[in-house]
Image (cartoon, rainbow, N blue to C red):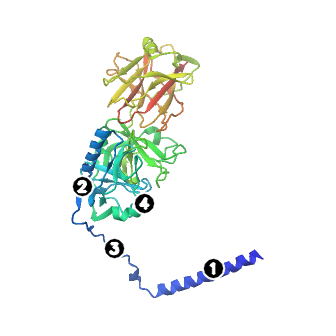
Amino acid sequence: MNTTKKYYKMNSINLKKLISVLVLAVTITACVQDDDFRTPALVIEEPDFPENSTFVQIGGILGDLAQAQNDDGPDAKVTFEVANQYLEGYVVSSDKAGNFFEEFVIQNSPSSPTAGLRVLIDVNPLFTSYEFGRKVFIDLEGLSIGTENGVATLGVLSGDEVDQIPSFSQEERILRSSEVAEITPLEITFEEFSDDLTNLYVQINNVQFNRNDVLGNDPLTFAGEPSDEFDGERNLESCDTGATAVLSTSTFADFKSLTLPTQQGSFAGVLTKNFFGDTFNLVLNDVTGLAFDNENRCDPNVLECDGTSGGANVVFEEDFTGLSISDLEGAGWLNVNTTGGSLDYVVGSFSGNQYAQISGFNSGESPFEVWLVTPQIDLTASSAEELSFDIQANFDNGNILTAFITDNFTGDVTTTEWTQLDASIPTGPSGGFGDFEGVGPINISCIDGNVRIAFRYAGADPGPTTRYHIDNIEISGN
């Protein structure tokens, strides 16, 4: 059989059908007045609840969960068995821009909220039914609440985990009120992050992205870098205190490829935690949640030395090979926790390589500030000096390492006048180990005499606790 003829014959028939449909459509359109195409306004009436219905607040079921976890451990869940019991809340997340997926977040009040909850449901998109500010009622019978990814989560119990509400029960489970409230973000600071504030719509003022991420010839995008596998994690820093937090953006967000803004301003979005539940994250509903309209950045004053630097002579070097912290301290290094805790630097090793190591994870210290300071380094007999070192960032949840220099050390890191070095500290993966990356060379040729280099590690647990490895510190010159 001639398949070519058969193909053309079938396409001729289809073409005739298409022309007939188009002619019919045009004929019908010509007979209809323009006013008939107006889309009727969507009217949502208040749900009709059974007479014996009861209504509960988010704070109430969070209290039930806290009691269960106090009695049975952090993995305990609470399943609701009472019929016609409805949870009230206001939607404060939106998946319209693709930064949330098959979940929405509710809080107990449009303003001054005190309790929030993540709701998992196998439906996408959700913003068409549960838009930002919409009041909803959730039928709790048969649902369960637990802590998933570090935050309180409502859904159906599947094994030992809270899973998504099935799509087929969406309409009977989640009822829409006619009320769409104006949501006023709760103004907080990085230092106020706590589990009680997760799942709330918050605002943080006077913040900016780290200068190493946005200034220069190759600024970062929200989540469009080759290394962004699931989420892009970018450091926001406070212009008031210097504290940092992680802005997390899905690689499916429609603004993932936009470059980060260079200005400073305010953030408005949801406070949550990362996939592992160990680090606070900030998440935007869409890019308009960043009101970065202040052109005056608050970058720190860093050492700026004019002229060329670098030479063949090694003035100082340390690779930590064969040493312990006590050996370093005996050689004049200082290892100081200025916030009174026990967290300090140690010498770590992997595959025979040794390095200075610090991590605030599970330290329970909030905040912490730990300094590692080199011995006195004499620069009087050299010139054109430059500094370099290697950094490995691991389990990264915020850039909390800063390098300093001084030529007038008092013996006390808290009373010494330090000058920050223009050191671009590498970022690493949030869920594992990064690679060692070189920092520098940094021109320090305008500092003379006896100097000390310091590495300040400042964060909080819970909060930023990135683990750093420092190696191959070297000053060279002529």
Q: Secondary structure at mark 2?
A: strand
**Which numbered disc covers residue 56?**
2
Above or below residue 330? Residue 159 is below
The label nearer to you, 3 versus 1, is 1
Q: Are marks 3 and 4 in contact (CB under 8 Å)?
A: no
Whether label 1 touches label 4, CB < 8 Å: no
Residue at mark 1 to residue at mark 2: CA–CA distance:
58 Å
Mark 3: which amino acid? Ala
The answer to whether residue 278 is above or below residue 33 is: above
Vertical position of residue 47 compared to residue 67: above or below: below
Image location (x, y in percent) of residue 304: 45, 29
What distance separates the C-alpha of mark 3 from that of mark 1?
Answer: 38 Å
Badge 3 or badge 1: first in the primary sequence: 1
Residue 261 in view here: no
Position of 263 compared to 20: left or right?
Answer: left
Q: Residues within 10 Å of mark 4 (few under 14, many from 20)?
A: some
> CA–CA distance between discs 2 and 3?
31 Å
Q: Is residue 148 visible?
A: yes
